[in-house]
Image (tube, helix red, strand yellow):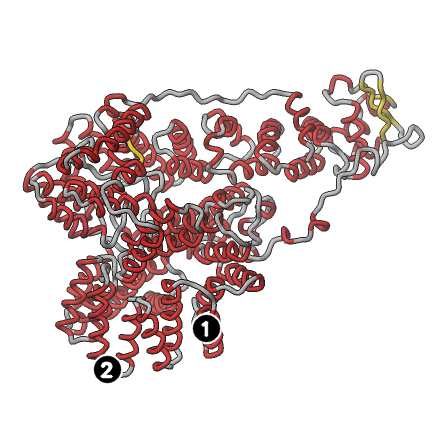
Amino acid sequence: MQHNLFTTIRSLKIVDGCKGTQVYALNPAANAAGIGGCVGVGDKLHDHLKASSIRCKSMHNSSISDILLPFGLPVTDLLEPPIEPCLKSVNFVDTLADVYRRLDDSPSLDKSIIYLEQCTVFRCLSDPKLLRRSLRSARQHAVDIHSKVVLSAWLRFERREDELDGSSSMDCGGRKIECPKASLVSGYDPDSVYDPCLCCRSASEAADVEVPMGQEECSTSNEDGDMSFCIGDEEVRCVRYHIASLSRPFKAMLYGSFTESRTETINFTQNEISVKGMRAVEIYSRTKKLDGFPPDIVLELLSFANKFCCEEMKCACDAHLASLVSNIDDALILVDYGLEEMAYLLVASCLQVMLRELPKVLYNPNVMRLFCSSEAKERFAMVGHASFLLYYFLSQVAMEDDMKSNTTVMLSERMVESAVLGWQKKLALHQLGCVMLERKEYKDANKWFEAAAEAGHVYSLAGVARTKYKRGHKYSAYKLLNSLISDYQPVGWMYQERSLYCNGKERVTDLQTATELDPTLSFPYKYRAVAMVEENKIGAAISEINKIVGFKASTDCLELRAWFCIALEDYEGALRDIGALLTLDPNYMIYHGKVHGEYLIELLQQHVQQWSQADCWMQLYDRWSSVDDIGSLAVVHQMLANDPGKSLLRFRQSLLLLRLNCQKAAMRSLRLARNHSSSEHERLVYEGWILYDTGNREEALAKAEESISIQRSFEAFFLKAYALADTSLDTESSSYVVQLLEEALKCPSDGLRKGQALNNLGSVYVDCDKLDLAADCYLNALNIRHTRAHQGLARVYHLKNQRKAAYDEMTKLIEKARNNASAYEKRSEYCDRDMARSDLSMATQLDPLRTYPYRYRAAVLMDDHKEAEAIAELTRAIAFKPDLQLLHLRAAFHDSKGDTASTLQDCEAALCLDPSHTDTLELYNKARERVTDQQEKK
């Protein structure tokens, strides 16, 4: 596209957009109290820390903690849990089952919006894979172009492709589901969205050839034309029949009872079209083509078509202009024309470019003026491009970027205005309440939370209580939570919230109950830990916070533990936690959001032994071997500080983050590994892992093969083997995976990765019943300190009926591994029932998110004919982790008791999580058949 032409277009007409103003200001009192972020305070503190770091070498050790903790240790009175900006159901299983039933029963054309609701329900589970699957299904079943554009952009945003160097917002991944061109094609075709798109055509096939005006087609000559349109002093000769065919108004004008039907020359001077534009109209009337016209002429034709109801011409102009939009500058120039001329496809194309540039365009005022105000929303609505879906996506991006910003407020307000369905209103109102609460605008927050609660969102009552408390009505907040606990089946967050509004033993009891009902809530651990610090029991405080850090790594808990370590003068421990914290969130601000974590790293490093890069590698081996994932992360963080462009380290970082179930941070590390790749074959491997981890297995295999074709490497062979092994392997496929892993082991790599390859190779051999070969692999892995190989070797011994040897192997793993919940769980398989119960109890204590212990205990209770206790054991876990296997097992228990209604509900909830789970589908269909038979008998 010729941008000088668009510059000309810009000069033709200036459309004044709605301009956002800075309405809200930061609360200086809050900043002074150390609650919010403030640049001035941060700068002063930076200067203080720098000065302190110079002086600290000459000071006595007793004052170092004071220097490193300029605000002192946290206090319980300032701690409070966040109100999460998502739909949170009191009965999550019922919600899942309801969504599944409606998906199963709804017409195909209605499925997209239900999948979007499912995505919203899944958001509170913090599982990116479930979220992505729902978004893909919503896009698959999208009917209109607007929905396709928004959902495709959303899928792209979830992968954060904007962070990949060299990528363009309009790049296509090769499948129709996210192809920008395919999104602009109308119609419903869910079976083809995963097909390859046409963007893979050769450049010669895909190129649009622009023909200068007049070269391809000439205007009608005086001899051929039978009438003229007069514009100023010039005439444009036309064929009356062709012009009349453009629209019914022209047909009536030229062949009806109007004067123009009897004259050869018609004065068109006052109809706001240029001579060039009218000549283009004449050419189009004969050829029905626009390829030879520059954009400004096509815009004239679009306006002309609107004025004279030339629908075919309007559609052609709309599509042609839409095809020209390729970047933000184009979109900003053309979107106002599209809105004014009601050009649906052109606006869709402009909208697509803007959305695919998120989150960067949040800082482009020219783009935000189009989205943030009510007036702008109405303009989009007039052309069919204002929807709840659009503002839901925009507000999610804005909240993730800065929850307190004016942009987030305005987009959330537009989301409220766009909400139509019940769940949309609940979400939009609750979310706006959360934004206002974050901004400390408690009166407005209370209003929105109350509206959400009136719409049926029970969790919003926690927001109502919080805003009452913030405005000085503590007893009113307490009474509200009392009523909530009385009226509904209690869940952990209810007791957690009520604990804020009571004191002493009652608060301690509520927090303990909250942990028992939902051990994944971090606030109770944090509160108990800080309370212990206030009693000068810092060691006990660290033990308490370790309970949750052991299975749920989070920035706030790691920061808290770092504070405790500094108070104990354990500077290595503090350095470990801040390094791991910054890996999870590189922009994290410590000390109540006032200081970047890197500043504290600089200070702490002056009080610990300095490591060379070789020392760091040795430390990494030690911590990796002891299954100390957080310690390993901290070492990698230090190594990257010395060598920030090392892609290999970024890749190691991503593997550790995946172990810790920090998928978002892991994907960021993978993208950085890809961006810092030193060679094409290495870049292809990391791109392959990105594709694999986002559910694109076939594309990942293709990247691995392309990398191998360039250069044989350990990582390329390993990726290919790993992706192939991710399915049920037959004998031939298993042999091929073995071959790939053996090829990987022949390539240069470090012991950390070779140990993993040997471990995987052993697993394949076990599946093939080649136990001796598997044992050799595991022993070789152990020889290079791959500690997890103890688990594989134990499995081999167990299959050889050497149960005592298997038990001993797992005991070795428990002794060596810092994170050993899985080892206790696995060891339970190799001992008697009583010892198994003990091991599984320990596994649950260390990691309550592991589901096998609950399933085992429930199965034992069921064997002992204690059906109610068995179901209660599963229900306890399902309350905070609605897991597929837990739901399936409970459904089977309900079925054995003849409780068909409960069986159906648990099956539906499980199928909402995984609609293809064979065992659950079988159980569900049998239960439905029984219901049908019973109804027929009646």
Give the residue at x 20% y 37%: 80
Image coordinates of residue 126 in percent, x first then y, are 33, 49
In this orientation, which residue lies closer to the viewer: 844 or 305? 844
On-image quarter of the N terminus:
top right
Dot 1 alpha-carbon crowd within 10 angstroms: few under 14, some 14 to 19, many 20 or more: some
In this orientation, which residue lies closer to the viewer: 844 or 448? 844
Q: Answer above or below: position of 408 versus 819.
A: above
On-image quarter of the C terminus:
bottom left
Q: Answer above or below: position of 683 versus 496.
A: below
Q: Amino acid at mark 1?
A: Glu
Q: Is residue 447 visible?
A: no
Marks 2 and 1, the one that precedes in the sequence: 1
Residue 175 picture quarter: bottom right
Image coordinates of residue 750 in percent, x first then y, are 40, 62
Residue 758 picture quarter: bottom left
In this orientation, which residue lies closer to the viewer: 51 or 383? 51
Residue bearing mark 1 = 742
Q: Assess whether mark 1 and mark 2 are in contact (beta carbons under 8 angstroms).
A: no
In this orientation, which residue lies closer to the viewer: 255 or 188? 188
Image coordinates of residue 410 in percent, x first then y, are 40, 28
Give the residue at x 22% y 59%: 818
- Kind of element beneath mark 1: helix
Q: Answer above or below: position of 175 versus 561.
A: below
Residue 105 picture quarter: bottom left
The Cα–Cα distance between marks 2 and 1, rounded to whole angstroms, is 28 Å
Image coordinates of residue 448 in percent, x first then y, are 30, 31
Q: Amino acid at mark 2?
A: Gln
Q: Is residue 599 visible?
A: yes
Residue 802 is marked as 2
